[in-house]
Amino acid sequence: MLIAIALAAYAVVLLSVALASLRWGDSMENFLVAGRKQPKFLVVASMLASTIGGGITIGTVQKAQTLGFAAFWFVAAGGFAHFLQGGLLSRKVRESEALTMADLADRTAGSLARTLTSVIVLVTWTGIAAAQFVAVARVLGTLVGFDHATSVAIAAAFIVVYTLIGGQKSVLRTDFFQFGVLALALLGSLAWLYFAQPPAPDTIRIDLFTAAFGPLDLLYYVVVIGGSYFICPMMFSRILSAKSPADARRSSFMSGIGMLGFALVLTFIGLWAAATGFDAGKLDPLNAIAKSVLPRPLGALLVFGLLAAILSTADTVLLTAAGIAQNDLVKKNSVLGVRLWTVAVGAVGAFVALFHMDVIGLLMKTYNGYTAGLVPALFVALLFARFENGASRRRPSAALFAVAIALGYALGLAGSLAGTGALSKILPLVGMTVSTLLSLLAFGTGEARAMRT
């Protein structure tokens, strides 16, 4: 009963913040990028809260128990990607004055690139939304014993409602609070595990490679998984919300530092579970630790922290997909349209979540095509971009640039369908290479045509 009351109070707090942000729904710029006036501390906290979501938090601990220290790279790859993002892209992205990543693709590579980007992001981020709904179902099951279907329905309905009320401003405000809850819960749990129930000496191993994780796996994590953070519509929405290009750049660097810290914390919780022979039973290790190992108050805080992580990712995922669907596919300036798309994406994601339980597997499959096709192409486009009045003066050959995205995406998707062997990692890497080379050729061809005309 107390837990149910606490959940209800938590929901009321989030809805109150959303309602307080309702006035930011008067324009697309306010609803999607919070008026481009947000302070650095909100941007950084939101970047971290959105990246360290429920799927990654639960999944990294689970991977660390089976793979060992190598699971560190699942989150750390994103941290290094944010450092690279800060050094190469953040300032330029903010200077573009785009509303979405697909809008940015239009401003750097043309309308065909905008359409392809929109479709790929909409499909991919619907899958990520489903992964978050699966994760919240597990948390609610731990807290109040709801079955999977009931948990998914409750999660989807609540997240959709509170996202469509306040838009980006509400997301930024609630992310700051939820990031604090998650950070406190994870740090407290790590400290208790190692000081109150320390594993036996020499049972914690820091091996970069194991029989189950080799150099190819490391390359895949750093390039493919890291790439999904480097060129990311959720992170770009935060960058576009920052007060200035300088703030946007600093925010990426600070978020990278935070992600490396989270990677270590999550990995060492998983290593504790492996070293102590902890049996999670039917639960994932992190929820099982919260339920049966930690003191009850700390266990409850950890579960609420996991819930906060899921919510802070899920709301951003929904708003990102809905904003791109309305702004870049429908191409009409309508906040109501974004809200309707939020409902649609949430409904599809919830349906997928009812039948797909593997969180990390689902994330991997949605990332591969996106990362192999879009990330290299948009990176090349941003490197060539020279913005003037909101659009780049340098443009690629539209057809060849589209081929670069499509071939890269196809190879990445083929990797998702290739099972768990080496080919599943090689194909996305080949796709990224093909997309990069063809994008460079597209800009060379486009530049040559521009010179002749």
Image (tube, helix red, strand yellow):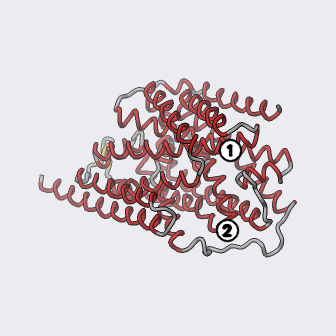
The answer to whether residue 166 is visible is yes
The residue pinned by badge 1 equals: 138
Quarter holding the N terminus? top right
Of residues 37 and 360, which is closer to you in this image?
A: 360
| Nearer-N-terminus badge (1/2) | 2
The residue pinned by badge 2 equals: 68
From the viewer's perspective, tell me whether residue 386 is left or right of residue 276: left
Q: Determine whether 111 is above or below 373 in the image.
A: above
From the viewer's perspective, tell me whether residue 354 is left or right of residue 280: left
Residue under the image location 61 percent in, 56 percent down:
259
Circle number at residue 229 = none
Q: Determine whether 149 is above or below 371 in the image.
A: above
Q: Determine whether 391 is above or below 266 in the image.
A: above
Residue under the image location 75 percent in, 49 percent down:
185
The percent position of residue 418, horizontal first and vertical second, equals 45, 62
Of residues 405 and 45, which is closer to you in this image?
A: 405
Task: Identify the amino acid type marked 2.
Answer: Gly
Q: CA distance from mark 1 to mark 2?
A: 23 Å
The percent position of residue 314, horizontal first and vertical second, equals 57, 41
